[in-house]
Amino acid sequence: MMIDDYAWFSCERYPDLADAYCFTYVRGLTPEQLVTRLGGRTEDFSLMTLGELVDAAYSRPDSDGMLFGATAVGDWVFMVEPNGLLGITEETIMPLSAGTRLVSHFLNIEGDDYFYWAEDGEIRFAFLSQEGYSPQTPGELVETMRRITSDHGHTYPHNGPAFLLAEQLTGIRLTPQLLEESIYLSGAVPEPS
């Protein structure tokens, strides 16, 4: 598998998502459990398509909380945040990963690029725009990191490596069909403090 396999995730195909997004995967939770862990009430959430979720993200005031959509993918819940950052806020991901694995990647319009792998409340591996990759690469990622480095040198995660790393850690290959055909339990939760 190559980084270029994720070239479909582009601003041309997803003009209001590809340049400002956060994708988060949490193992062993349902969308409803994710909402509860994030401090939301499932009765305040509704089902949306990806297009409806993206439209809602850009049409509502920020004061209404942090909007996201969540869908089940096998044993995982996949959370999509158009122009959001819950999945890379340490105050959120540390408790969200309690007793399980969390993998997230993020890009914003300014080009800030983050990747996190948290396991049971601890960060195992990260990429932060200003700091680069974690100094120690866990054994589970050594071969993937070697491929990324040998194929593309120092490539920023949103250009493909984040998708490869997420796939390695979750077993989920993000495809246009998965992204576009899923129905998301969607709503807002309070911003982390």
Image (tube, grey):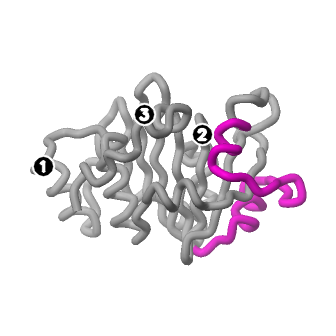
Local secondary structure at mark 3? loop
Q: Residue at x 29, y 49 (%)?
A: 161
- 50 and 148: which is toward the camera: 50
Local secondary structure at mark 2? strand
Q: Residue at x 33, y 57 (%)?
A: 165
Q: Earlier in the sequence, mark 3 or mark 1?
A: 3
Q: Amino acid at mark 2?
A: Pro
Side (left or right) of 152 relative to 172: left
Q: Amino acid at mark 1?
A: Asp
Looking at the image, residue 72 lies above or below residue 88 = below
Q: Amino acid at mark 3?
A: Glu
Q: Is residue 47 magenta?
A: yes
Q: Residue at x 58, y 53 (%)?
A: 93
* Part of the protein shown in magenta: 28-56
Per the image, the residue denoted by label 3 is 12
- Answer few, some or many: residues within 10 Å of disc 3's Cα (few below 14, many 20 plus, some between 14 and 19): few
Query: What's the distance in space between the residues labelled 3 and 1, CA to CA?
Result: 24 Å
Q: Earlier in the sequence, mark 1 or mark 2?
A: 2
Task: Indicate the position of residue 122 as horizontal and vertical percent values.
Answer: 49, 59
**Disc marking residue 82:** 2
**Disc marking residue 151:** 1
Task: Indicate the position of residue 175 as horizontal and vertical percent values.
Answer: 43, 59
- Answer few, some or many: residues within 10 Å of disc 1's Cα (few below 14, many 20 plus, some between 14 and 19): few
Local secondary structure at mark 1? helix
